């Protein structure tokens, strides 16, 4: 299951708790829109142009040349085109749960992009935050 589809499966639970889900992506809005339609996503996905937000949180890295070639030749992805930025910079996959006071209550992030935060785990953190408020 695609990571965003997995988030969609817990989206109604998030809303039922009185919370919001916002995804931030370095991909340009046209690519995000196509992906959101394909996966039937109901939550907003915001464009983090040039990874400014991810960089502010210390969550970016630049792909080395050998991985750039893997992305192009094996995955058929040219990040410079998709992201509208020639830096080949990507965010570390991360998930933040923010409480009603605007404080970060939980962070899940792993520099290994293959280790993605589980939506159910994020939902469990959210339930704790909502129960504590």
Image (cartoon, rainbow, N blue to C red):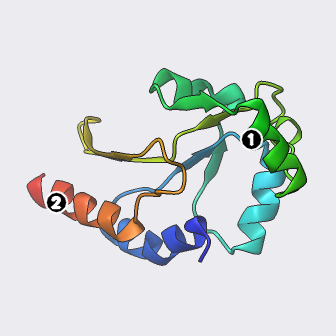
Q: What residue sits 13% from the left and 61% below the top?
A: 131
Name the side, left or right, on which 62 lies relative to 29. left
Mark 2 or 1 closer to N-term? Answer: 1
Query: The residue tagged with tag 2: helix, strand or loop?
Result: helix
Which image quadrant for residue 122? bottom left
Residue farthest left in this picture: 132
Q: Is residue 2 above or below residue 22?
A: below
- At which x and y percent is residue 15? 40, 67
Numbered circle sitting on residue 23? none
Query: The residue tagged with tag 1: helix, strand or loop?
Result: helix
Q: Residues within 10 Å of mark 1 (few under 14, many from 20)?
A: few
Q: What residue sits 31% from the left and 65% below the top?
A: 121
Q: Is residue 118 above or below residue 40?
A: above
Which image quadrant for residue 4? bottom right
Q: What residue sits 80% from the left and 48% below the top?
A: 70
Is 123 in front, or is 113?
113
- At which x and y percent is residue 85? 81, 28
Name the side, left or right, on which 22 lies relative to 76. left
Q: CA distance from mark 2 to mark 1?
A: 39 Å
Q: Is residue 90 above or below residue 131?
A: above
Name the side, left or right, on which 63 lies relative to 13. right
Name the side, left or right, on which 37 lies relative to 90. right
Cβ–Cβ under 8 Å for marks 2 and 1: no
Number of disc labels? 2
Numbered circle sitting on residue 67? 1
Q: What residue sits 77% from the left and 73% below the top?
A: 38
Q: Nearer the viewer, mark 2 or mark 1?
A: 1
Q: Residues within 10 Å of mark 2 (few under 14, many from 20)?
A: some
- At which x and y percent is residue 93? 51, 47
Numbered circle sitting on residue 128? 2
Residue farthest front in this picture: 66
Picture quarter with the N terminus: bottom right
């Amino acid at each position: 299951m695609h990571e965003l589809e997995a988030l969609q499966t817990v989206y109604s639970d998030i809303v039922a708790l009185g919370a919001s889900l916002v995804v931030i992506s370095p991909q340009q809005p046209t690519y995000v829109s196509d992906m959101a339609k394909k996966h039937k996503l109901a939550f907003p996905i915001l464009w983090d142009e040039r990874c400014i937000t991810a960089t502010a949180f210390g969550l970016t890295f630049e792909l080395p040349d050998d991985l750039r070639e893997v992305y192009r030749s094996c995955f058929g992805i040219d990040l410079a085109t998709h992201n509208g930025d020639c830096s080949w910079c990507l965010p570390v996959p991360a998930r933040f749960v923010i409480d009603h006071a605007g404080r970060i209550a939980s962070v899940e992030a792993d520099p290994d992009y293959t280790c993605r935060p589980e939506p159910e785990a994020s939902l469990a953190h959210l339930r704790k935050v909502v129960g504590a408020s």
